[in-house]
Image (cartoon, rainbow, N blue to C red):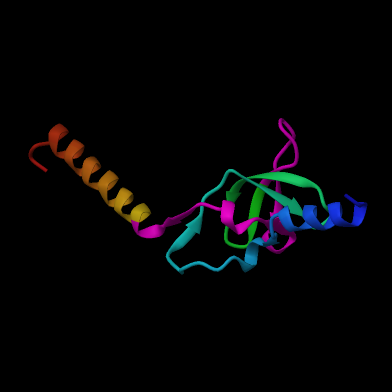
């Protein structure tokens, strides 16, 4: 197999990377952390949190985490996990209900 053929087959198997800020999703969804990304300069990082306009990344294991603008991060959208925010709201309501029950148990007159 020639080098040109080998290079083309490698390009076909390389995942299509897109900018993190261009990943389309519903308004009520959020991208879950813990995935690999590539910064514009080609360096690979581990994303530990996805915020509104930035992401918290770990350049290498044990190195200090840094903020990177989402438009500078390239990701494979197929590897992203997304959570619907309604489940987050339901969890918050559940915690609040449990807190109210605890308060009533400690102070029955309330």
Q: Position of residue 88 (x, y in %)?
A: 37, 53
Quadrant in the rendering for residue 11: bottom right
Q: Position of residue 99 (x, y in %)?
A: 24, 41
User: With 40 as the anchor, is 82 left or right in this view?
Assistant: left
- What is the residue that sits farthest to the right in this orientation? 3
User: With 55 as the anchor, is 30 left or right in this view?
Assistant: left
- In depth, the one of 92 and 72 nearer the eye is 72
Total labels: the figure holds: 0
- What is the residue that sits farthest to the front in this orientation? 1
58 drawn magenta: yes
Task: Give the residue displayed 34% in from the left and 54% down from the top.
Answer: 87
Q: Position of residue 23 (x, y in %)?
A: 59, 65
Q: Position of residue 107 (x, y in %)?
A: 13, 36
User: With 94 as the anchor, is 34 left or right in this view?
Assistant: right
- In depth, the one of 45 and 99 nearer the eye is 45
- What is the residue that sits farthest to the left in this orientation? 109
The quadrant of the picture occupied by the C terminus is top left
Task: Give the residue displayed 22% in from the left and 41% down from the top.
Answer: 98
Relative to 26, residue 67 above or below? above
Task: Give the residue displayed 32% in from the left and 50% down from the top.
Answer: 92
61 drawn magenta: yes
Task: Give the residue displayed 27% in from the left and 51% down from the top.
Answer: 93
- In depth, the one of 61 and 16 nearer the eye is 16
Q: Which residues are magenta?
A: 57-86
User: With 47 as the anchor, is 99 left or right in this view?
Assistant: left
- In depth, the one of 12 and 25 nearer the eye is 12
């Amino acid at each position: 197999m020639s080098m040109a053929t080998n290079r083309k087959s490698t390009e076909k198997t390389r995942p299509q990377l897109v900018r993190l800020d261009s990943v389309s999703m519903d308004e009520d969804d959020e991208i879950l952390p813990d995935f690999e990304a590539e910064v514009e300069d080609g360096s690979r990082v581990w994303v530990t949190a996805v915020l509104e306009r930035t992401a918290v990344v770990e350049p290498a294991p044990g190195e200090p985490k840094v903020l990177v603008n989402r438009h500078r991060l390239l990701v494979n959208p197929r590897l992203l996990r997304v959570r619907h925010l309604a489940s987050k709201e339901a969890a918050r309501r559940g915690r609040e209900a449990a807190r109210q029950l605890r308060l009533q148990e400690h102070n029955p007159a309330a």
